Image (cartoon, helix red, strand yellow):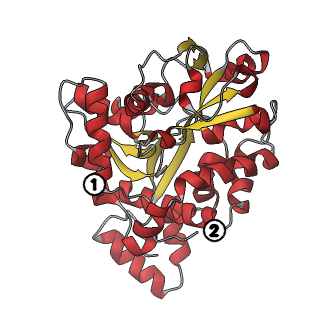
């Protein structure tokens, strides 16, 4: 893959050429000024986002002329406001929430530029001993735990609409992300919302056979999930945005092919992680990243018709003041070359 660096033109180019002829290229490379990039995750550091740590560990971002720092997030909705505020250059945030944000803030520069989760891993997980099955109607009258601002909860009205069920099919019990497993184990609630790959902590405490996983996709919804978002970076430093995507895409392809190096990278960042659990988590994550669509069209992109339906659904369900243009929500101009995004199972 071609590397693009942010070297200044003129004298710097002359010096670089002369140094190469003298065999001094490494010294010039060391003097290169890297572009600082602040990137916020959607949540904690786990194997779900291990490709970004692989890119960091292997120097892929530096190869592209970037000095990337990665911070934990506080939810896939909160990432949008972090980027919109300018506190972060890039973030991992929910595409449906971004459509809603655009309707409420039509002048926002925040756009999705790389679709990470090709399908949203939104699920409700229920206890079978409370009568919950894979049928969404089994949730009727139950108590379902969720954080106050959380993508799976926010998107429930779209599922209810698809099922022709009232949005009040069950009772919401607001709880913190960190308390969700506990209220499930204690039986304070009958079910809880999760990103499917985040539920491995629950699976470690309640046998899977005793739990029913209700996948939003089974309700007939095709929803793109978390995407890489950028704001002012796209106008101020567009080449930096492209460079970040090239490095991240490179690492994602490697992780999909063989994830062990990515697991080691994420373990180095968070030594407390249990790699057996992270392998189990990644096995679930992979299903939502590598889909028939990504095999056919490549990583990172979206199908315009699918995106348009999602934006229409969000606008209708949330009674938005305006329907954002899909091309304002997702900007494909920054994607790596199509050949570099090809991937197979």
In the rendered image, the quadrant that contains the C terminus is bottom right
Which of the pair 168/98 is nearer the observer? 168
On screen, 211 above or below 111? Answer: above
Mark whose residue sits in front, 1 or 2: 1
Within 10 angstroms of label 2, few (less than 14), some, or many (20 or more) residues? few
Horizontal side of residue 37 vs 253, given as left or right: left
Within 10 angstroms of label 1, few (less than 14), some, or many (20 or more) residues? few
Residue depicted at x 23% and y 25%? 320
What element does badge 2 sit on? helix
The percent coordinates of residue 167 (x first, y second) are: 42, 19
**Can residue 110 be spotted in the picture?**
no
**Quarter assignment of residue 142:** top right
Q: What residue is shown with label 1?
A: 304
* C-beta proximity under 8 Å, tags 1 and 2: no
| Mark identifier at residue 327 | none
Which of the pair 9/335 is nearer the observer? 335
CA gap, disc 1 to disc 2? 27 Å
Which of the pair 154/18 is nearer the observer? 154
The percent coordinates of residue 272 (x first, y second) are: 80, 38
Horizontal side of residue 325 vs 271, given as left or right: left
What element does badge 1 sit on? helix
Q: What residue is shown with label 2?
A: 257
Mark 1 / mark 2, whichever is N-terminal? 2
């Amino acid at each position: 893959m071609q590397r693009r660096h942010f070297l200044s033109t003129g004298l710097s180019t002359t010096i670089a050429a002369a140094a190469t002829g003298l065999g001094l290229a490494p010294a010039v490379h060391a003097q290169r000024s890297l572009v600082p990039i602040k990137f916020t995750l959607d949540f904690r550091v786990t194997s779900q986002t291990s490709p970004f740590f692989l890119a960091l560990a292997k120097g892929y971002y530096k190869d592209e002329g970037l000095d990337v720092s990665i911070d934990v997030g506080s939810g896939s909705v909160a990432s949008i406001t972090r980027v919109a505020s300018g506190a972060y250059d890039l973030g991992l945030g929910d595409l449906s929430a971004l459509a809603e944000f655009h309707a409420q803030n039509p002048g926002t520069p925040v756009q999705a530029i790389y679709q990470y989760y090709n399908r949203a891993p939104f699920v409700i997980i229920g206890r079978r001993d409370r009568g919950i099955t894979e049928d969404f109607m089994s949730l009727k009258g139950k108590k379902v735990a969720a954080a106050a601002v959380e993508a799976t909860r926010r998107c429930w009205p779209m599922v209810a609409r698809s099922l022709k069920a009232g949005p009040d099919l069950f009772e919401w019990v607001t709880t913190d992300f960190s308390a969700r497993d506990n209220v499930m184990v204690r039986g304070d609630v009958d079910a809880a919302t999760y990103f499917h790959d985040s539920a491995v902590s629950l699976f470690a405490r309640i046998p899977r056979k005793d739990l029913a996983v209700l996948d939003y996709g089974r309700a007939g919804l095709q929803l793109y999930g978390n995407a890489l978002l950028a704001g002012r970076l796209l106008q101020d430093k567009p080449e930096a945005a492209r460079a970040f995507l090239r490095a991240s895409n490179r690492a994602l392809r490697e992780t999909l092919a063989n994830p062990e190096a990515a697991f080691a990278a994420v373990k180095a960042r968070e030594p407390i992680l249990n790699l057996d659990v992270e392998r189990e988590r990644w096995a679930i994550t992979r299903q939502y990243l590598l889909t028939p669509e990504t095999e056919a069209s490549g990583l990172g992109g979206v199908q315009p018709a699918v995106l348009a339906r999602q934006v229409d659904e969000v606008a209708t369900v949330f009674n938005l003041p305006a329907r954002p243009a899909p091309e304002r929500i997702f900007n494909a101009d920054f994607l790596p070359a199509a050949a570099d995004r090809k991937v197979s199972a």
